[in-house]
Image (cartoon, coloured by chain):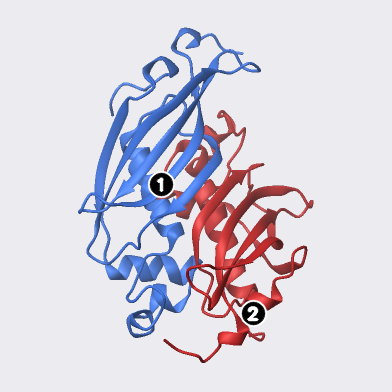
Chain colours: A blue, B red
Amino acid sequence: MAEPLHFEDFAVGRRFRCGTRRVDAEAIKAFARDYDPQPFHVDDAKAADSFFKGLAASGWHTAAMCMRLLVDGLPIAGGIISAGGTLEWKLPVRPGDTLGVEAEVLEARASRSRPEQGLVKLRISTRNQHGEDVQVFSPTVFVPRRASAGAGA
Amino acid sequence: MAEPLHFEDFAVGRRFRCGTRRVDAEAIKAFARDYDPQPFHVDDAKAADSFFKGLAASGWHTAAMCMRLLVDGLPIAGGIISAGGTLEWKLPVRPGDTLGVEAEVLEARASRSRPEQGLVKLRISTRNQHGEDVQVFSPTVFVPRRASAGAGA
């Protein structure tokens, strides 16, 4: 694991590239059976005749896969912790797609209420193997300041 | 399954209540091992010493459980289909919590590009057994108009 990232590492405009993950039909259906069992996520024939014109991953599955790539590839000190943000699904994720994630720093500011941390707004793009955005999530994450490391509470 | 809901059923202010789901520690850890394996989602001892002060569900697990309650409880004609929205995590979800979901209609308008459907903005609140919001998701969903049912393309 790389050196943990602190607030000072999040310069506006900096981009962090995470790894990739291949998506197959069985993974799409397995997630959907548990959490989003709509026909277009679990049944090839019904999916072909649906809005999506073919099997597509649940948007929540895409979001979960993006999170796994972030956890494995963006080592923020203390973890990746957020109160949410804007979530956009741009294109369907299909069996055979390979997803990659890139996080760009949009804003970085000190926290007024907690001086030992900063607030970083990211644009987290999940892209398919054609370089197309399939999902864009723009959360504000809480990031400890390096100066306060070890200061304790 | 109840009669499918169409655009005409989504009057502004109407609320739809879905079922409930109990969350246990093993489910929290199982989801997190696959998609969000941070210590505070998979390890009780490390979670106690973390930002969350105890084991907490991944926000994406909360979102996925909310989606399952919607799929089972909000029978929109053609499925629950959205391009996203604002996602807010308000409070941690803990082992033993029972989650419920309520969707309130914030806006409803015709689609200019696709006259056979409407666009409905919902505020989807996921609440714990104390009635506290743990997550609020505010997507715009695509809902077929009843008048066009069977018109085909």
Amino acid at the residue labelled 2: Leu
Residue B97 shows in this picture: no
Residue furthest toward the bottom? B150
Quadrant assignment, res A6: top left
Q: Circle 1 sits in a helix, a strand or a loop, which is it?
A: strand
What residue lies at 62% left-to-right and 17% top-to-bottom?
A114
Quadrant in which the N terminus of chain B is drawn: bottom right
Q: Quadrant of the C terminus of chain B?
A: bottom left
Q: Nearer the viewer, residue B151 or A26?
A: B151
Q: Would you name the residue on which mark 1 appears? A: A136
Residue at the outermost front position: B112
Q: Residues within 10 Å of mark 1 (few under 14, many from 20)?
A: many
Residue visible at 35% across and 67% down in the picture = A28
Q: Which residue is mark 2?
A: B5
- In the structure shown, which secondary structural element does the residue marked by tag 2 occupy? loop
Asked if badges 1 and 2 are on one and the same chain, I answer: no
Q: Position of residue A24 (x, y in %)?
A: 26, 65
Front-lying residue, B93 or B71: B71
Give the chain letter at badge 2. Answer: B
Q: Reply above or below: B147 against B121.
A: below
Identify the residue at image location x=46%, y=34%.
A80
Determine whether A98 is above or below B8 in the image. Answer: above
Amino acid residing under circle 1: Val
Separation of marks 1 and 2 at Cα, in angstroms: 29 Å
| Left-right relation of B18 to B84 | right
Tell me the subunit letter for badge 1.
A
Q: Classify 10 Å Cα crowding around label 2: few (below 14), some (14-19), many (20 and above).
A: some
Q: Position of residue B81 (x, y in %)?
A: 50, 68
Query: How many numbered markers are drawn?
Result: 2
